[in-house]
């Protein structure tokens, strides 16, 4: 296949050169209320790759990005603190034949961490892109949770902008006695 970044022939979705020069993750922590959110890239670094979520081939790119970020992170975390924990992706609805968030959460399976797919879905799919924090608060996602109660969990999404979506998800999960340790996202838009 060809590298999605430089179009040279590559055995992987992104070639080794592009991975090392362009897509080396740098972990950054941000706090949204009581929720700690870890991101791996500034948004501008992987914007062109994230926009592939609107295309069928985005499936391979999201899986690849999860393999070089979320996967080593959760493996290291679980080796330090082994206990059962659920992986909850935000709004794992299927578009273009796959859910881009499920591509991310699927890679977080370990002997202790278990993806709980499509258990947190929004009732309001209004687009937040480019909208203010106030607009987002006035048009809440209205999440519905259908997963297990009284568990620990890690929240997963592709990007964080104002943190409004993650904050709404966190508050709903608290009502179901889901103890969210932290959230992981690929990219932070507010660089
Ligand atoms: Zn390349």
Image (tube, helix red, strand yellow):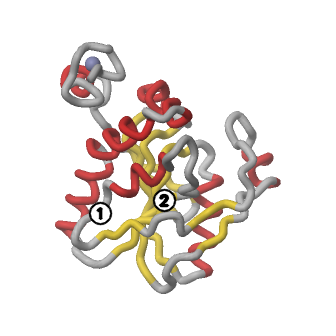
Q: Residue at x 78, y 48 (%)?
A: 134
Exactly how many numbered labels are in the figure?
2
Q: Is residue 41 left or right of residue 14?
A: right
Is residue 42 among the parts visible in the rendering?
A: no
* Residue at the front extreme of this rendering: 97
**Residue found at x 48% / y 33%:** 50
Q: Mark 1 falls on what kind of element?
A: loop
In the drawing, what numbered circle is on residue 89? 2
Looking at the rendering, the quadrant in which ligand 1 lies is top left
Q: Earlier in the sequence, mark 1 or mark 2?
A: 2
Q: Which mark is residue 43?
A: none
Tag on residue 109? 1
| Residue 190 spot, x, y in % from top left | 55, 36
**Image quadrant containing the N terminus:** top left
Report the side of 10 relative to 90 (left or right): left
Query: Does mark 1's beta carbon lie closer than 8 Å to ligand 1?
Result: no
Examine the image and state in which quarter residue 76 appears. bottom left
Residue 50 position (above or below residue 95): above
Within-10-Å neighbours for mark 2: few <14, some 14–19, many 20+ = many
Name the foreground residue: 84 vs 188: 84
Q: In the picture provided, is 148 more to the left or to the right than 163?
A: left
Q: Residue at x 35, y 23 (%)?
A: 4
Location of residue 59 with respect to 124 vertically, above or below: above
Q: Image point 50% across, 50% down: which residue? A: 99
Q: Nearer the viewer, residue 88 or 42?
A: 88
Can you tell which quarter of the image residue 77 is in? Answer: bottom left
């Amino acid at each position: 296949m060809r590298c999605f970044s430089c179009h040279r022939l590559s055995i992987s979705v992104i070639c080794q050169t592009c991975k090392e020069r362009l897509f080396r993750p740098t972990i950054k922590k941000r706090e949204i209320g009581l929720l700690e959110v870890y991101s791996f890239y500034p948004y501008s670094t992987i914007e062109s790759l994230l926009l592939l979520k609107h295309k069928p081939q985005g499936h391979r790119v999201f899986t690849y990005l999860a393999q070089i970020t979320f996967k080593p992170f959760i493996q290291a975390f679980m080796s330090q603190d082994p206990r059962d924990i659920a992986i909850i992706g935000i709004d794992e609805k299927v578009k273009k034949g796959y859910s881009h968030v499920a591509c991310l959460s699927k890679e977080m399976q370990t002997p202790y961490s278990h993806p709980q797919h499509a258990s947190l879905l929004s009732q309001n799919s209004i687009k937040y892109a480019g909208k203010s924090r106030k607009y987002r608060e006035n048009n809440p996602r209205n999440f519905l949770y259908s997963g297990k109660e009284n568990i620990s969990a890690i929240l997963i999404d592709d990007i964080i902008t104002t943190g409004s979506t993650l904050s709404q998800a966190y508050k709903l999960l608290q009502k179901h006695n889901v103890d969210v340790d932290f959230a992981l996202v690929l990219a932070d838009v507010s660089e």
